[in-house]
Image (tube, rainbow, N blue to C red):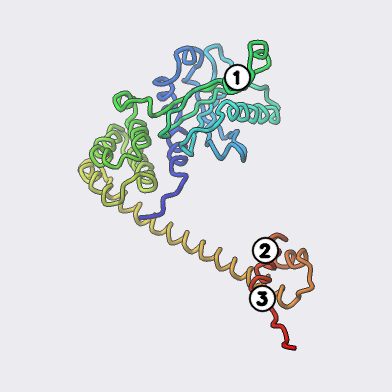
Amino acid sequence: MAARPSNAEDKLFKLTFSRPELVRELLKRTAAPDLLASLNLESLAITNASYIDEQLSEHFADIVFDCRTKQGEEVAVSLLLEHKSFLPQYPPFQVFKYQINGWQHRINAKLKPAPIIPIIFYHGKDRWKTLSWKEYLQGMCPAFEPFTLDGGYVLIDLADLSDQAIQQFRFGFLKTVLMLMKHRFERQYLLENLTNILNFVEEEVELEIKTDDYRVILRYMSASLSLNWTDIKLMVKPLSKTHSAMTIIEELEQEIREEAREAGKKEGMKEGYAQKTKEMVISMLENFPGQSDEKIAKVAKVTVEYVQKMRAEQAKTKPTPKRKKK
């Protein structure tokens, strides 16, 4: 089976929740009534914006939507996938940073800042406890509250959504995605229920959409679930009477094999280049021992630290000269 990429959840998340109708459905089923009463969810429109910086990328992937309030005011609705599937230490602090990035993005674009509603989508094993920022602060007292933000966010924790609740969702594809993400570590559960979970996709009407959805889901299954291709084929086979699911599996197997070969070639090229670079540096150290590390690094196109490391290793392996007998 192909190597399982660590970003499989990220890909599925973005492919799923780039669809406004699915985001609309998710929010209607999970968001607080007062939030839903304020937003015009029919106005949801995906943007190409992202407010994730290098530090936040360790925790989240995001999808940003433009939205309007019931009064016509502009709002940004951001879905953030907690993609490492474990509890971040200070969620409100990360929310502050995310919102500041978003407001800076708008200011740089000569736009007025608008409210940013962060919606964290969590599918980890540990229980997530929602706290405001002031609850994390030591020495907090009421006099300090005017100077302290709450760092509020909407939490969608898959563990809090029962299977029965998920099955009440409107779209079959969304039901399948949520069920697979929720139970991805439960091999026995998947073996017993995968056919029924995949059967939700059959509820989609248009064959073209259904085919695309199957490809997305099978890609995710091949990369992240605790199943192998044999398991998947057995579970998908009953569906092949009404759909070309088995054909898609065969196509994906071939695609994944080709991708693995290409990845292997690229890795081999990287290793070959690294070996040649190492040999060049060692050769220069041996033939030009008086040359500075900076000069060698410049010629070999490596860092000075790399040259220093090679010089230290060379010194360790160099034989100690024998003392002459008196």
Q: State the image quarter where residue 273 is shown.
A: bottom right
Q: From the viewer's perspective, tell me whether residue 180 is left or right of residue 285.
A: left
User: Residue under circle 2?
Assistant: 309
Quote the CA–CA distance across marks 3 and 1. 59 Å
Q: Nearer the viewer, residue 156 or 70?
A: 156
Q: Nearer the viewer, residue 160 or 136?
A: 136
User: Residue under circle 3?
Assistant: 318
Q: Secondary structure at mark 1?
A: helix
Q: From the viewer's perspective, tell me whether residue 117 is left or right of residue 310.
A: left
Q: Callout 1, which amino acid?
A: Lys
Circle 3 crowding by C-alpha within 10 Å: few under 14, some 14–19, many from 20:
few
* Label of residue 134 in the image: 1
Task: Report the residue at 55% width, 25% height from top.
Answer: 66
Q: Callout 3, which amino acid?
A: Lys
The percent coordinates of residue 308 (x first, y second) are 71, 63
Counting residues from the start of the chain, the first of labels 2 and 3 encountered is: 2
Counting residues from the start of the chain, the first of labels 3 and 1 encountered is: 1
- On screen, residue 245 above or below 253: above
Q: Callout 2, which amino acid?
A: Lys
User: Contact, CB < 8 Å: mark 2 with mark 3?
Assistant: no
User: Contact, CB < 8 Å: mark 3 with mark 1?
Assistant: no
- On screen, residue 279 above or below 181: below
Counting residues from the start of the chain, the first of labels 1 and 2 encountered is: 1
Quote the CA–CA distance across marks 1 and 2. 47 Å
The percent coordinates of residue 233 (x first, y second) are 26, 49
Quote the CA–CA distance across marks 2 and 3. 14 Å
Task: Report the residue at 63% width, 69% height from top.
Answer: 278
Quadrant location of the C terminus?
bottom right
The percent coordinates of residue 315 (x first, y second) are 68, 71
Task: Report the residue at 66% width, 78% height from top.
Answer: 319
Q: Secondary structure at mark 3?
A: loop
Q: Secondary structure at mark 2?
A: helix
